Amino acid sequence: MGVSKLTVISSYLPSFFRIITSSRLAMNGVLALSAYQVASVTHCQHARRKEYQYQMLAIQDLRKCLANFSPEHADGALVASMSLLWLCEDMSSRSQISEGITAILQTCHRLGHRSELYLRLAEAWQPASDRCASPIPDFVGPLLLQDLIIEMYRFQALLRDQEPEDDTWRKLRLLIALAQDLAKLDPSTPAEKQFERVRLLRDYKLWLPLNDLLSGRNLSNTLMVNAYLYTLALYAQQHTSQAYMIDSTIDMQDLLEETMRQVNPIDANMTNTVPSTLKIEKVTLDDIKTLTEVWFAAFTDPEIRRIWPDTPAVREWWTEANRHDLVHKPFQHYIKVVDSETQDAKGQPRIAAFAKWDTAMPQQRGRRYPPWTKDQPGKICDEFIAKEEQERLRVMGDEKHYYLDTLATHPDYQRRGAGSLLMRWGCNLADRNGVAAYVDASKSGAALYERFGFKDKSLPGAGDVASMARPRGSIPEN
């Protein structure tokens, strides 16, 4: 797979972009990476298909290139190979591609090719023969594995408060379960059971921070989960009779050490939970205009903006709608999260996020919104809201429940725990009163609600909105 420096790709991407202008092979590799990033963020099946198509094109072009290799094709072949390496989902395939990259680098050396990309990769790349000769240090013992499991649980709690991306949260949960299985193995464990557990580890995806690097998400969290994976692989290599299943051409120790060096300087406050400066308070009438500003900053999706375009009329519509409900609907609770150390233009603590929890059933609430403005497509708006109301009725029926009407977090405060504070407030209220809860969530934001006990009840093909219900007495995941 190459040494671990190559798993942190931020420094290599600029070189890729310079090469793709003159190499179709490199372009297909980078397009596959881009499609992967889009699919990871949006869960769009079209992007997933494009990722596969560009991977296949890159593989086909790479085969043709290697069959008649020449120096002018070297950089394109390296870019395509590295792209395919980062998109691989198991250690075995990654090892095969790494052997191909080693061969390309050796050929470049013989031919005297000395491009900037070649020199950088050649300096970082370690031949497989050298890696195989390196002894595996015995530092991950059974007792330390138990400590690792405890640490992963603590990190899981940290991720819950930081509102991580969906994949990071789920990957860590799967790793914890795998670590608990590995902890049960000992020399007396039948070989077939050891084989089953180690096979899971071997086939585990070696997740790389590609998505975080391209989309600006939390790189520290992704790298930390990677570090846990590498530590478990080291444990399996040292303490199971099926160690041969873990690819010995991967310098797991070096991979772990380099990953940790990348984690430490990225986020010195990584061990913090919700910042102490964030406080939850009730919304006042003086806050109403600011809520509108936070809402438009938080929701920029084209489909949402189609219904609520950012015009002066629609902003005024939102302000007056919230003002009316705050004054005339006491069963609707407006809650805000403020940053006590940052002031707004009025000299007040800045509003980081807000939520609207509706404790009434639809019949008591009445019409959800006032009449639309001329700037809004009335028919489309009516159909959108009617669909949400129908889904709520389908999922919840006549069961008493609280409805999370709105949750908006300003981009400056996303993934800092503000949304979790608002969720915890409403879920605690529902639990105290022994009622269920419901929310219309975006698919991309569903992870936050899942951590508080919500389950996706959407019908197949329902689109990008998830109909999520939380049963009475649900306990948020730790």
Image (cartoon, grey):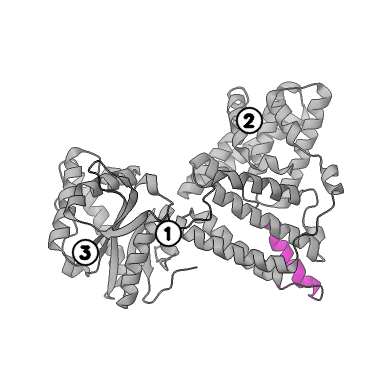
Q: Amino acid at mark 1?
A: Leu
Front position in the image: 63 or 185: 185
Q: Amino acid at mark 2?
A: Ala
Identified at 19% across, 56% down, the residue is 284
Check disc 3 and report the residue beneath it: 332
Disc nearest the viewer among 2 and 3: 3
Q: Which residues are magenta?
A: 184-208
Q: Amino acid at mark 3?
A: Gln
**Residue 193 falls in image quadrant:** bottom right
10 Å crowding of disc 2: few (<14), some (14-19), many (20+): many
**Does residue 463 show up?**
no
10 Å crowding of disc 1: few (<14), some (14-19), many (20+): many
Check disc 1 and report the residue beneath it: 448
Front position in the image: 19 or 427: 427
Determine whether 45 is above or below 53 in the image: below
Q: Secondary structure at mark 1?
A: helix
Determine whether 55 is above or below 140 in the image: above
Q: Of callouts 1 and 2, which one flags the residue occurring earlier in the amino acid sequence? A: 2
Q: Does residue 68 appear left or right of residue 19 in this picture?
A: right
Across and down, in percent, residue 272 comes to 49, 56
Q: Secondary structure at mark 2?
A: helix
**Residue 120 falls in image quadrant:** top right
The label on residue 397 is none
The label on residue 26 is 2
Q: Does residue 412 appear left or right of residue 127 in this picture?
A: left
